[in-house]
Each structure stands twice: as C-alpha cells, then as structure tokens.
Amino acid sequence: MVGINLQDVWRARKRISSFINHTPLIFSPELSSISRTNVYLKLENLNTSYSFKIRGAANKILSLSNEEKKRGITTFSTGNFGMSVTCVAMKLGIRAVICISNRVPKAKVDLLKRAGAEIKVVGNSQDDAESASYKLETEQGLTVIHPFDDALVIAGQGTIGLEILQDLPEVDTVLAGLSGGGLHSGLGVALKNTASTIHLIGLSTSKGATMLESIRAGKPIAIQEQDTLADSLLGGIGLQNKFTFELVRNYVDEIFLLEEDEFEKGMAFMFKHHRMIIEGAAASGIAAILSGKGHLGSNVVVVISGCSVDPAVVMEIVRREERA
C-alpha cells in the first residue's frame, strides 16, 4: 500500500538498532482493573530522545547519501521530532536546523537547546515552521526530514509494532495519539500485515484534529488549531499528503477526540500509578480508557509516546486531580 510494506519496517529495525532502545512493555494492574481487560503500556518515553520519534528520524537520516549528510538537514517540529533529529545528527556529526513555531512549549524548546539544536523559531503554526524548513532547503541546500509523511520515517515508527508483537504476541488492540499519522501508519503496516485482526485506535485533540477532519472530508484539509495540553497532537497533515492520509484511512479502525480534562486525568493517572511524568499526547491512550472510549479486546497496548513536558505542569495537574 502506497509504497510501504512490512519488509521496509524490518529493514528499518536493523538499520536503527544502535540508535534506539527496545522499550519496555509493562502491565498496568490499575488500568486493567478499570477496563476489565489486560492493559499494557509501551514506554516510548524511555527511548533515546524521550519519545518514539527517534525511530523514524534515525531511519531517514541513516538512509541519506554522504553528500546529503555533508550539506546538512532541517526539519519542522512541535518538539519531539526536532529533538530526535538533533540526537541523531549530533551522533553523526551532521548540521541540523530545527524549525519550530511560537506554539512549541518552553519546556520543549529548552530540551532542544540542551541537546545542542540549531533552532529557528517562526510563525504560529506547524505550517509556518514547514515553510521555513523548505526555504532552508532552497537557500542553503539542506535536506528536509519530514516528521511524518515520509516512507522511511513511517517504516521507522513501525518498529514499535514489531516490538509489541515480539513482547506480546497475543495483542489485539493498540491505542496511541494521532496527529500527522506517521505513528499510526507505521503501526498499521507492522501490525496489520502480521495480524490483520488487531484493532488500531487513534486519539486526537478536539483543539485540532486535522487527520480526522481530513478523513471526514475525503481529502487532506487544513483547519484552525487552538492551544492544547497535548501540543504534540497539533499540526496539519499537508494538503499534498503522500502517505499518511491513505495509510491512516485504511489501517486505523477508530478515531476519538479527547478534551483537555481527559488529557489531564491521563497524565495524573500515569504519575499516581506508575510514577512517571508524561506529556499530554502520551496520555491519550490512558485518557481514552478512563473515559470508556474505544472497543477494547483482551490484550490492549497503550503507546506512551513521550515525556517532553515541564514537570511543574504535571505536578500542578496532579494536585488539581487530588483536590477534585
């Protein structure tokens, strides 16, 4: 389907093995009790760049020619992909310019700076950051690393699915936050071409669910975004989308919208019961289960996508939830 297959994912796994962690898959007694099923958490917050996006970034960058690496690279990001590109680039000695909008939270900007990123802040949307990235390609010859709509990036993200299948062969349901669709596209290729009955659920923010609205419209569209705790779920999918629109439309079985209070409950739950600080988007699967959204099977995996968030924000949420 659209030029990406299971073999691409297996090749990606081999290529990126020294850049990523095979992240833990842990059982959640509390979520299992609440949902009356077996719920496991795939801890991508423990990956090399603190999110799953290191997988796609590494697979793409390692596939570049020596000349492309020499000229340098650029990407546009809500934070996590930029962090992942920076980590890979620093390890390989490649120049990388990360274009971000003013909507990216300070905590993520600070992480990028500490990682040594060359940052360019422009505009108020992911689209503005994207335009800046392609301008750098034209003016300076940098290669654009697309954060989701790229076959090699998608194959890299799909390696999560291979690990899930290895650690829990009986998995029948997978939930994860849905934005541009790179993660769900990769999961769909890996999971559904191995076991077609696996139920794949996407979770988006009501503050800007571009993929869901595009699927409803039957084509990629742009929508107005609002600030959200789940800032990693913001961003358009590109009106000229090549891969993820079709892959998500074909592989994802259900898509649900989440509200701000649901993300907060998910973040607080993760801290209270698993002693981990995670960002809003990463809490989407937990939030969905707590809200009773989605058809769950007997063995459910929630992808905890990352932890790029100010700990003070999480602690304030935890205090509010305790007072409620």
Image (tube, rainbow, N blue to C red):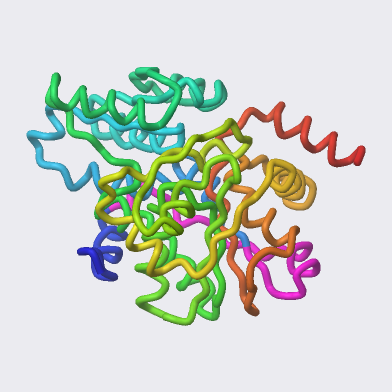
Furthest-left residue in view?
A: 67
Query: Residue drawn at (18%, 28%), measured in percent from left and top?
Result: 72
Q: How far from the left and from the top, in percent, is residue 125?
A: 43, 28
* Residue 159 shows in this picture: no
Looking at the picture, tell me which residue is in the foreground, 226 or 193.
Answer: 226
Query: Residue drawn at (71%, 26%), measured in percent from left and top?
Result: 312
Query: Residue drawn at (20%, 64%), measured in percent from left and top?
Result: 3
Looking at the picture, tell me which residue is in the foreground, 179 or 165.
Answer: 179
* Residue 152 shows in this picture: yes
Asked whether, in this view, residue 58 is left or right of residue 35, the answer is left
Q: How far from the left and from the top, in percent, is residue 115?
A: 42, 25
Asked whether, in this view, residue 124 is left or right of residue 282, the answer is left
Looking at the picture, tell me which residue is in the foreground, 168 or 304.
Answer: 304
Query: Residue drawn at (54%, 44%), measured in percent from left and top?
Result: 306
Q: How many marks?
A: 0
Looking at the picture, tell me which residue is in the foreground, 115 or 144.
Answer: 144
Residue 244 lies in the magenta-colored region:
no
Q: Which quadrant of the figure contains the C terminus?
A: top right
Residue 36 lies in the magenta-colored region:
yes
Q: Which residues are magenta?
A: 16-40
Quadrant in the rendering for residue 96: top left
**Whether residue 149 is situated above or below residue 5 in the rendered picture:** above
**Whether residue 60 is situated above or below residue 131 in the rendered picture:** below
Q: How far from the left and from the top, in percent, is residue 26?
A: 63, 62
Q: How far from the left and from the top, in percent, is residue 146?
A: 29, 41
**Whether residue 135 is situated above or below residue 183 in the rendered picture:** above
Asked whether, in this view, residue 165 is left or right of residue 239, the answer is right
